[in-house]
Image (spheres, helix red, strand yellow):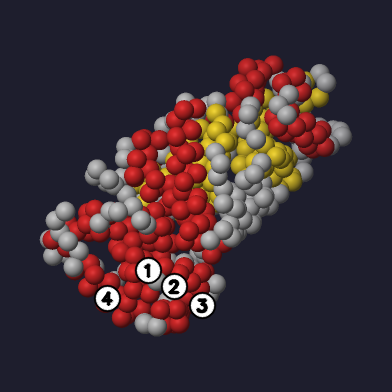
Amino acid sequence: MLSRRGALLLAVGGLAQLSGPGPRQTVRTPTGDAPAGPPVRPEIEALLARRAGALRSPDQAALLAGVAPEAMAAQQEALARCRGIPFAELSYRLTDFTEPRGVDRFTVTADLGYRLHGIDNHPALLGRTLEFVRAAGGWLLAGDRPTEAAALWDLGAVRVVHGSRSLVLGLAATADLARTAEIADHAVPAVEEVWGDGWAGQLLLEIPQTEDQFARLLGVSAADYQGIAAVTTAAAGAPHGTAADRVLLNPDAYAGLSDLGRRVVTTHEATHVATRADTRPWTPLWLSEGVADYTGYRGNGRTARQIAPELANDVEAGRLPSALPLDADFAAGSAGIAQAYELAWMACDLIARQWGEQRLVALYRAVGATESVRTQGLDGLFRAQLGTGLDEFTRQWISEIRRLPTHP
């Protein structure tokens, strides 16, 4: 993810890991004295299967055939909002279901799984709360809303732009989305120059209209992500390491960046996508954010003072770090988050200059492949990959920071 500070900004930030095992299904038996009757679940599952097919088609008549009169207008709008999205797959799976007894209205929860053509190998999952009402011919859908994180089409009409190396879905004007696609199309080969082509080589970018909508896509508080220009998230429900990663842009912060800043931010996030398969929970954030910043700034002609202005101010004031940044230093809203990113960039830039860019790549991949980093730390891998221990590297890094120019 990326935050903007000053004219150029670029405290670029975190790779949000939203993937994981699928939710457990909960099926409850009815209670009460009313006759049980035939089970309702098969009818609801069939209705949702028809609904999913109608959304994917899209087919308005088929969609509205399963909708209650009170929800007709809202569901017509929902269909219009996602028309044009290149769904390769779309389905609902009930996750919490209680057989209704003696009621005319009930709610359940479900996962909405969807896969996009050319992007996803596995469906992304969105939690939904579904409401049904009893009608003369059976049950009808009365509501379909996000349980936590929203889908982009929950927020407005989605426009679609296909780039040569990207797919951009957004609520802004098509011309604005096309400019973002052009930046993304240049970011992908820039990342491949460092990290190779052993990843999908395509970016999916989602662009809401407001910072509040950006937070709703993540299912977080907007206050926690103020000033963050972009976040890369793994598609919820997809196995770790798949190519189903999404770059979510915060339109307010992103709009405040220069053209160079937008290129750096997009390349940074593309690096997170490219390194997903090599990134593990034990990979320190200074390394994952540092390599993303290194790749983003690579070859852009900026000086260290221009890339790390907050850190340069600290050096001028006599404030020097004593250790590499902790993961907590990168949390959205943390004091000193800009310096954390700049410190991480300087560490990875030092490795690339001193030992070579491919040594940086090898170190990153070795860390991801070595779970013992959790308990034994990075020293052994530094010795194996760079020929120097972590403590000695840290001393070199601090010396580099001490020499950071304090004036442009």
Compute the Cα span from label 2 to label 3: 20 Å
Residue at image location 69% in from the left, 16% down from the top: 69
Distance from Cα at disc 1 to Cα at disc 4: 13 Å
Secondary structure beneath dot 4 equals helix
| Circle 3 residues within 10 Å: few <14, some 14–19, many ≥20 | few
Left or right for 168, reference 125: left
Q: Is residue 203 above or below residue 325?
A: above
Q: Amino acid at mark 3?
A: Ser
Mark number displayed over residue 396? 4
Q: Position of residue 67 (x, y in %)?
A: 72, 22
Vertical comparison of 277 with 203: above or below: below
- Quadrant hosting residue 144: top right
Residue 233 makes an appearance in the image: yes
* Spatial CA span between label 4 and label 2: 17 Å
Q: Earlier in the sequence, mark 2 or mark 3?
A: 2
Of the residues tagged 4 and 2, which is closer to the observer?
A: 2
> What is the distance, in whole Å, between disc 4 and disc 3 at their CAs?
25 Å
Task: Please tell me the numbered disc located at residue 372.
Answer: 3
Can you see residue 150? no
- CB atoms at circles 2 and 1 under 8 Å apart? yes
**Rounded to the nearest whole Å, what is the CA distance between mark 1 and mark 3?**
24 Å
Q: Secondary structure at mark 3?
A: loop
Secondary structure at numbered mark 1: helix
Q: Nearer the viewer, residue 122 or 111?
A: 122
Amino acid beneath label 2: Arg
Residue type at numbered disc 4: Gln
Q: Position of residue 4 (x, y in %)?
A: 31, 45
The part of the image, by quadrant, that contains residue 30 is top right
In the displayed structure image, the side of residue 20 where residue 17 appears, left or right: left
> Mark 4: few, some, or many residues within 10 Å (few <14, many ≥20)?
some
Check disc 2 and report the residue beneath it.
Answer: 359
- Sooner in the amino-acid sequence: mark 4 or mark 3: 3
